[in-house]
Image (cartoon, helix red, strand yellow):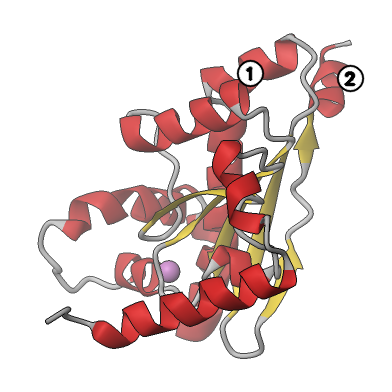
Amino acid sequence: MKSLKYLFDNNLAWATTIKEKDPEFFSQLSKQQTPEYLWIGCSDSRVPPNQLVNLPPGEIFVHRNIANIVVHTDLNCLSVIQYAVEVLKVKNIIVCGHYGCGGIKAALEEQEHGLIDNWLRHVKDVHRFNAERFEGLTHDEKLDLLCEINVKEQATNICNTTIVQNAWKQGCELSVHGWIYNLENGILKDLDTCVTSSDVNRRKT
Ligand code: CO
């Protein structure tokens, strides 16, 4: 007997619905992927990229981890960025955080959580670098602010990767965006951190 049978039932119903609308959908998509977006987001089950922006399979290349962190020594994340930029030639990299992020909350608190505390050190660093901005805020305000600042910091980290720097040097059309999602109302917000190759080249001149 198949375990988790209801998931296979769901899958069959999903695939059937898509094929009814577009009989060639899967056969066409199986030949190639040409997504325009790389999404780097939190692993949180409540923040599913394709559903949030209502795009079908094939449109978004995705990397997710706890607290949507981009670290220059993380070969997993860097490999995703390299493949997305150099092979798939995505035009937009979106780092999307979310309010109420458990990873960010854990990084703000002193409680120990074991192995994951090593990963969350990156968020604790973001907090420490910006310590003065948190003075006088309530705990909830601190949490919201750290969720936002963390997105901006990770967007900067993406911009500073050799992969993105080289793409910009070569004149590739590539933008890096910082967004945040609100679990309570399902709405995305642009944190106005967009950086493009023309911004970088303008700064140099
Ligand atoms: Co999260």
- In primary-sequence order, the first of circles 1 and 2 is 1
The quarter of the displayed image where residue 79 is located: top left
| Amino acid type, residue under disc 2 in the picture | Arg
Vertical relation: 164 (above or below) 184: above
Packing grade of label 2 (10 A; few <14, some 14-19, many >=20) is: few
* Number of numbered discs: 2
- Can you say which quadrant of the picture contains the N terminus? bottom left
User: Horizontal and vertical percent for residue 194?
Assistant: 77, 44
Q: Which residue is mark 2?
A: 202
- Give the residue type that dot 1 points to: Gln
Q: Which is more toward the observer, 129 or 173?
A: 173
> Which of the pair 107/25 is nearer the observer?
25
Q: Mark 2 falls on what kind of element?
A: helix
**115 left or right, relative to 121:** left
The answer to whether 59 appears left or right of 128 in the picture is right
Q: Is residue 138 visible?
A: no
- Give SS at disc 1: helix
Residue at 55% over, 20% down: 163
Q: Is residue 110 above or below residue 161?
A: below
Disc number at residue 66? Answer: none
What residue is rendered at 66% in x and 62% in y?
56
Query: Residue sitting at 59 percent across and 49 percent down?
Result: 27
At 80% across and 14% down in the image, what residue appears?
171
Q: CA distance from mark 1 to mark 2?
A: 14 Å
Pinpoint residue 198: horizontal percent, then vertical percent.
87, 24
Q: Quadrant of ligand 1?
A: bottom left
Disc sitting over residue 165 in the figure = 1
Query: Does residue 154 appear in this view?
Result: yes
Residue 188 in the image: state x and y as whole percent: 70, 72
